[in-house]
Amino acid sequence: MAVRGNLEDSENRHETAGPEKLKQVGRSYPLHDAEAKATGRIRYTGDMSLQGMLCARILFSPLPHARIRRIDAAGALALPGVYGVFTHENTPDVLYNSQVWYAGQEALKDERLFPDTVRYIGDRVAAVVAANEQTAAKALGLIKVDYEELPAVFEAEQALRTDVPVPALAPWASPFFSKEISVGHVDECFEAPDAVVIEDRVETPKIHHAALEPHVCVAYPDHNGKITVLTPCQILYSVRLVVATVLGLPFNKVRVLKTPMGGSFGGKQEVTLEPLAAFFALATGRPVKIQLTRHESIISTRTRTKTIGYVRTAWDKAGNLLARDLKTVIDTGAYTSNGAIIGMAMGKKAFRLYRIPNQRYRTESVHTNTPVAGAARGYGSPQIHAITEINIDHAARRLGIDPVKLRLRNLVRPGDLDAGGGPPLGQAQIIACVAEGAKAFGWAQRRDAPHGTGRFRRGAGMACATHSNGYFGGFQDFTTMTLRMLEDGSMILNSGIQDLGCGTVTSMKQIIAEVMAISPDRIEAPEGDTETSPYDVGSQASRVTHVAGACALHTAGKLKEKLCREAAKLLECAPDEVILQSERIRSAAHPEKDCSYGEMVSLIQEKNRTEIIITETFQAQDNPGSYGADFVEVEVDTWTGLVRVVEVLAVHDVGRAINPGFVRGQIYGGVQMGIGYALTEDIAVDPVSGRAKGDRFSRYHLVNMPDMPPVRVILIEKGGDLGPFGAKSIGEIATCPTAPAVVNAVNQALGTNLETLPLTPERILRALACQ
Amino acid sequence: MMHKFRMACPDSVAETLELLAGMEGEIAYLGGGTDLVPQMQDGRRQPDWVVDLSQIPELACIRFDGERIRLGSTATFTQIAGSALIEEQGRCLAQAAGQVGSVQIRNRATLGGNIASASPAGDSLPVLLALDAKLTVLGPAGERRISFERFQIEPGEGLRRGELIAGIDFAAGSRGHTGDGRHVPADKSDFSAGGRHPIRVSAFGKIGSRQSVTIAKLNMAAFLEMEPGEGIVVKSRLALGALGRHPFRLRNVEEEMRGRRLDDSLIVDVTKRLQEVVDGAIPGRYSQTYKRQAIRGLAADVFGDLQQQVSVEKASSSNGPDQGGGKEEQEIGC
């Protein structure tokens, strides 16, 4: 195995020692459900079978843009075992936006369960609900649809051209969203006579999240008109919001339960199958399961946006970054989803990595007749960092300055403010990441090593990135948790957490265990249930450890206070004289009167007539940057155009690793995803037919284990921000620096300026032919 | 969705033929199922009968009868890739077998299945051309033997209704065998006279989108017979895949190689000819530009491998002829 997975916890961690010795935080416990997953005992949604459950299959549009003249479902309905055929004619026409996560959020609403005009190959035309998959699939083939084909547009920049008639995709013009953020005097800097101006056009592809588990959902009705939805998602409360809105139900008649996650990466951060399953369950009075195939998940759910970035930077000869002018054109596909706010998410990152006194960011979002883009690990961050970091290396080449030195000169420092007006950057340790990384990687030697002149050429490259820690500064961000200690001393955390396989459940347990002087396995921390759990914003925006983790910390702190207060009455001492240690409780004055947590909780119930329970709402009050730098060596076969990534070093400023094993796991996976983004992954919508070429795994190439290089990880843990024990996010930033680092390494190896991702063999050979 | 079908699980070839007589409708043979099962699941194939060949021991063997290497059609790629006999006597087949699909696919997928599926990019197919392999086909009309090349291109020579591929065989390719089925006695004096046995080497290479678990964009197999003293090419067979419906032999190029030394200038010349072959095979296709360039890398890989083998063979020829030693242990399932 290429990845080093069994490092000692102390290895490769650069910590500032805290005053207290942590017992639980900083240890690598396994995932709470790792054993059940590895042994196959866990029941994923696809494994679930409820009594009387029906299966739904969806008919997806074979055309990129067409009005549905007529749907003839008679043949399908006549098939024994078919319980219903659903189309735009017999389903709600309520419009919704799949990515809203709070009630009242403004967003273009242009999606409905089944449209009367399909807008891309993969749009929903109809669905059959039947006794089993086979019958449903057979019935799909019996539905006759009469389409009136409409002209379609597949390229974002074609959608923007005013001289070409573009079919109206939506009531909104193209671009449907545009915005500008500007600081300083950008134009003047570019006009300065001695400015070195570096200009690039970078293109990033639509990619598939490639979670092992395709999209799946089960819904069932009850006798009182309530619908329960079982879904492996990131956003329980968004599901409730959209399902209740589309079905016209009160929020308390929609119960959403988080099921075990078989991978998401943002792909299950939007509401896709849930309102369909809920509606079918309501209409048939039966439990209904919808499970997509891989092909269907690729074409019909969500992708990363295709993004075209125009970037110009102005430098002085010494390598100071004077100004940057950035523009992104965002192809969000056939429906809006997050097409507006993702452009802003990209722009905000541009002001938080380098000290750039003059910068302008403009973004335009357009619709095309292509698969719908939406949330994808990094939420715009991989796109914008590919655009900007490729440009920084281009500048380094032109200025004749080493890319590490050039970056060190311009990167932000701890305590810096956000020039774009966002929240302060906090303990931004990107300089430490780059400096430590360069040393550990042997950057200078590798960078100066000969590239070779024969068939194989070697090169080294690096890139930096920043990402957020929640919504603070942009949207409301808070979490509520209820924590209890039971009569045997065990504990239950009741919260709306959604573990995406990253270790949220275990991390929360570790944080609480640290405060309560208890073993993490004495805590139950079930995932969210919208009927019984307090509200949570969702497992998104890299907010879970930093914000929900802080909520767990504060809630545990309050619970401990209450326990000490109540125990003090019984121990006849002051609350601050109560000592909690190894799940036993005593007073400082009478250590001999020592009892277990369970005995004390029972006594408190009996004597004080109260329960050890706390409900606490935590509001985020900071949003520091997480930072990372990847160093990459590649070998390019100049005859076949194939790139082999030889080694990767990933250095991340995570503030504090609650569970270093999880943090490394995120980084290994992030690197894998980033290499794919740089080299092989592309849904590749054909510009003529609108059909996705990479619509199955035989034609959509993930980086697999044999192609994975050894990945080394260094964690910078200097704390200092408001996350629990100083912890900051890792799940999304883990993949952000990788792709540009790989591209920069290839460009160094070949002396090219490749800037259209992925760097396929064809593109590499074409660039070499142009040299 | 899987169509309704009936299944037969014979445990001998004789029983298979017996059962066959009573079957009506479309018959599909199940080897490893790596192609057939997905095809049946999505409805591309809807056979009335599925006949499982995987439980027939005589179809799973890999053996050497003194002249030819004989593989049963249900030998899996894992077995073939790991077979010392194949490595010794038909190295390119072992190499190709080791690069088919993933470990899981190789554990199930069979050589016979690869032939029957006839994917344009099937990795074993150019190899069977380079080894000049012959097939034994059984069916209602009895047994017929046919060269793989004719089998795949000649109209009416492919599988007919009810027929199954029982075996694949090719001439043993190590030193000590003529390659034409005639066994050259390992005569000490003969050997010490300067190694008059020809050197036979073969190699396979492919280019996909990644190192493994990848469908070939190009694949190639080469077999060379060299005169040992000067290292002159006496005979060669070269086959390319993923450039059309079937992989094909490059007889013109083979002819041009005859009489030449296996040196870098030969590789340069062959590469040039291979590029012309690509241009001729897929003119105007989007992939032409890439494939005509990338074939240079493939040629370098395959011929580099051959060169290396030749130099190893030459070095080891002072240690006596290899007779495919320990072949008893090398054989599988027979």
Image: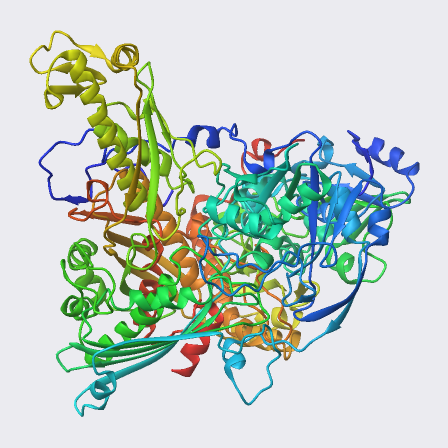
Which residue extends farthest front? A609
Position in image of residue A118 (x %, y %) = 67, 66
Q: How is the image coloured?
A: rainbow
Give the quarter of the figure containing the N terminus of chain A: top left
Task: Decide: is A224 above or below A734.
Answer: above
Left or right? Give the position of A451 relative to A134: left
Position in image of residue B242 (x %, y %) = 63, 64
Q: Which one is nearer the viewer's eye here, A551 or A305?
A: A551
Q: Which one is nearer the viewer's eye here, A707 or A574?
A: A574
Which residue extends farthest left? A589
Q: Residue at x 51, y 30 (%)?
A: A42
Q: Is residue A32 visible?
A: yes
Mark count: 0
Q: Which one is nearer the viewer's eye here, B259 or A733?
A: A733
Left or right? Give the position of A276 relative to A391: right
Which residue extends farthest top? A592
Position in image of residue A724 (x %, y %) = 23, 41
Position in image of residue A420 (x %, y %) = 24, 69
Q: Residue at x 52, y 47 (%)?
A: A239
Task: Decide: is A330 above or below A253.
Answer: below
Give the quarter of the figure containing the C terminus of chain A: bottom left
Left or right? Give the position of A455 relative to A70: left
Task: Decide: is B240 above or below A666.
Answer: below
Q: Quadrant of residue B129?
A: bottom right
Q: Residue at x 42, y 78 (%)?
A: A767
Q: Is residue B83 visible?
A: no
